[in-house]
Image (spheres, grey):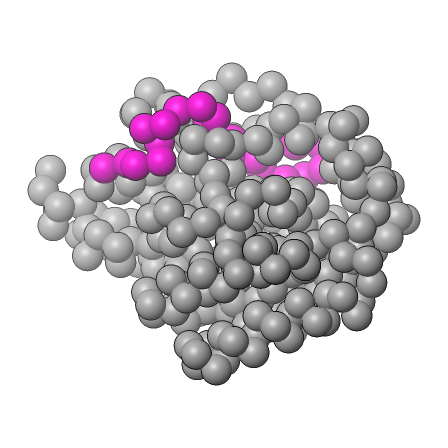
Amino acid sequence: MTRDDQAGKLRQLMRDVRTTRTIAVTGGKGGVGKSNVALNLAILLSAGGNRVALVDADLGLANLDVLLDVAAPYDLSHVVRGRKRLAEVIVDLPCGVQLVPGASGLEHLTRLGEFEQARLIEELTALEADNDFIVVDCAAGIAPATIRFATSADNTILVSTPEPTAITDAYAVVKVLTRHGYDGRMSLLTNMVADRHEARASYERLSGVARQFLAMRVLDAGYVLRDVKLPDAVRRREPVVLAYPRCPATRCLAALANKLGRGGLLVKEEMGFFRRLARWFA
C-alpha cells in the first residue's frame, strides 16, 4: 500500500466519525506527574457521566498499568505489529474508563515508521465512536510521536512543577507545538505546588514568555497541591481520587476536570482527534 493509499484510507475512515474531545497530557520533562494527572483526570471525567478512554501513548515507557495495578496481557505494541485488534487490547476498568495500555521497554515503538503509525491510527479511530473524551498520556519532551499526538488534540495540558528547569522544558514544548501550527487550547497545570501563589507565579512566567516571543496564548489549567496522599496512593497502586477522594490533590484535580467539562473554561472541540492526526500522512 502506498503512502497516498494510506492517507486516502484514513480520510475515508474518519470522514463520518463523531466528534470526541481529546485531551493530550504531556510535559517538558519526566518526573512532573503527567501520568498521574492523565489517569485521575480520566476517572473524574468518567465519574461525571462521560464515556472516557485513556490511551497510554508514552510509547516505550508506558506505566499506566503499573499505576493501576492492572495486568494487561496485550498492549499497543501488539496492535502496531498487527497481532491484535484494538478491541482485544482494551482493558475495561472498574471505574468506567477504557484503558488502552502502552508498552514499556520497547525502543522501536519510539520511532515507528509511517505504515506502523497509520495502522495504529486506523485502529484507534474506533475510540472516537464510543467515547465522549479521549485522554492521551503522551511522553514528555519533544519527540516526534509526542508532538503528533499533542498537535492533533483539542486540548493539550502541559504538566510542570514550579522548578525553573521544568518551566523551561515546558516552554520548549510550547515552542515546538507553535512551530507546528497547533491551533487547539494549550494550558499549563502546575503540579506539586506549596500554594496557589506559587502556582500563579509559575503560570505567569510561562504564559508571559509564550505571549511575548511566540504570540501563543497559554491558558491556566490550575494546579495540584503537594500532598503526601498522592505518593502514598502511587505506592498502593491506586488512583488518588479513589484512594483519597477528599484530599487536597483530589480537590485540585476535580477543579481541572470541571474546567474541561462541557462548557468549561478550557473547552475546545472542532475536528475529531484522529482526523487531525491523519493530516500528518496527507
Q: Position of residue 161 (x, y in %)?
A: 66, 55
What is the quadrant of the C terminus in the image?
Answer: bottom left
| Residue 79 colored in magenta in the image | no
Q: Where is residue 56 in the image (x, y as percent from the top left)?
A: 51, 38
Residue 280 visible in the current orientation: yes
Q: Where is residue 29 in the image (x, y as percent from the top left)?
A: 53, 48
Residue 258 visible in the current orientation: no
| Image point (25%, 49%), residue name | 10
Which quadrant of the structure image shows residue 43?
A: top right
Q: Which residue lies furthest to the right in this view?
A: 246
Where 215 sits versus 18, above or below? Answer: below
Q: Along the line of sight, which residue is nearer the eye, 46 or 28? A: 28
What is the quadrant of the N terminus in the image?
Answer: top left
**From which residue to which does the magenta span run?**
92-113
| Image point (53%, 61%), residue name | 168
Where 83 sits versus 203, above or below? Answer: above
Q: In this view, does 163 lie to the left or right of 157?
A: right
Q: Along the line of sight, which residue is nearer the eye, 113 or 5? A: 113
| Image point (40%, 51%), residue name | 142
Q: Is residue 229 left or right of residue 142?
A: right
| Image point (47%, 38%), residue name | 58
Q: Position of residue 274 (x, y in %)?
A: 37, 53
Q: Residue furthest front?
A: 164
Which quadrant of the structure image shows residue 180?
A: bottom left
Where 216 sits versus 98, above or below? Answer: below
Which quadrant of the structure image shows residue 40?
A: top right
| Residue 110 colored in magenta in the image | yes
* Number of marks present in the image shown: 0
